[in-house]
Amino acid sequence: MGAPGHFSIRIQTIIFSAGYAALFAAAWAWAWYADHPSLGFGTHPTGMVTGWAVTLGLVVGCGCAGLIHVSIRRWTWAERLEDRFVHILGPMSWLDVLLIAAASSLAEEAFFRGAMQTSLGVVITSLVFGLLHFGPDKDFRPWTGMAVGMGFILGGLMWWSDNLWAPVTCHAVINFIGL
């Protein structure tokens, strides 16, 4: 973390955010082409009210983040994975963490759950989501497996709530706590 009161944004955060903006634009294009332009934001006639969807996402996200925390304390592979991410990402300010957590959760959930899942289903989307979360070597294999599992959880949240805010909130909580 940066020094208290330090509000600089690193170039890495700007690059990540630009990439997520492009992914978000791709989600809207896919959704528009597939004739479901809302991407699941807001309340659907059959969907969960947005406030309840956000609450559900918060509860599930905190539970998943707690399990990750326990895993890091219990298993060597999880501790090694955390160390690798710390090394790659380096120190981050609160603003960096907030921006990356928000941008990644909005863009990835809009693309994977809002656009892809509505077109291809939960299984294919969860597998693709997990396979795109890979790292440079074998230490990152558990991250890929965890991402597949999280793809199913996030996909289930979208399916059950019929509202994209549940998986977006869950994803944001996990990323914010993890970063």
Image (tube, rainbow, N blue to C red):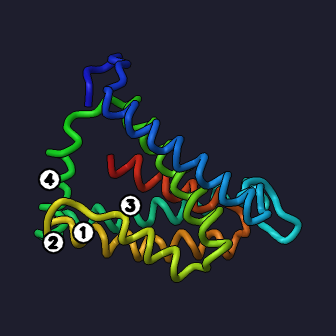
The mark found on residue 65 in the picture is 3
Q: For the residues marked 1 and 2, what is the alpha-carbon distance in whole angstroms?
A: 6 Å
In front of the other: 178 or 104: 104
In front of the other: 69 or 163: 163
Residue to which mark 1 is pinned: 71
**Vertical comparison of 101 with 157: above or below:** above
Residue to which mark 4 is pinned: 83
Is 58 left, or right, of 130 in this rendering? Answer: right
Is 109 left, or right, of 128 in this rendering? Answer: right
**Vertical comparison of 29 with 161: above or below:** above
Q: Where, by quadrant of the figure, is residue 140 drawn?
A: bottom left
Residue displayed at 61% across by 77% down: 120
Residue displayed at 61% across by 79% down: 121
- Whole-percent x, y for residue 153 in the image: 51, 74
In front of the other: 29 or 179: 29
Q: Counting residues from the N terminus, which is met first, the one under dot 4 or under dot 1?
A: 1
The quadrant in which the N terminus is found is top left
In front of the other: 107 or 179: 107
> Are the residues flagged by discs 4 and 1 in contact, CB closer than 8 Å?
no
Q: What's the amino acid at mark 1?
A: Ser
Which residue extends farthest bottom? 123
Mark yes or no: residue 52 visible: no
Q: For the residues marked 2 and 3, what is the alpha-carbon distance in whole angstroms?
A: 15 Å
Q: Residues within 10 Å of mark 2 (few under 14, many from 20)?
A: few
- Whole-percent x, y for residue 115 in the image: 64, 63
> Are the residues flagged by discs 1 and 2 in contact, CB closer than 8 Å?
yes
Residue displayed at 70% across by 69% down: 161
Q: What's the amino acid at mark 4?
A: Asp
- Whole-percent x, y for residue 106 in the image: 56, 49
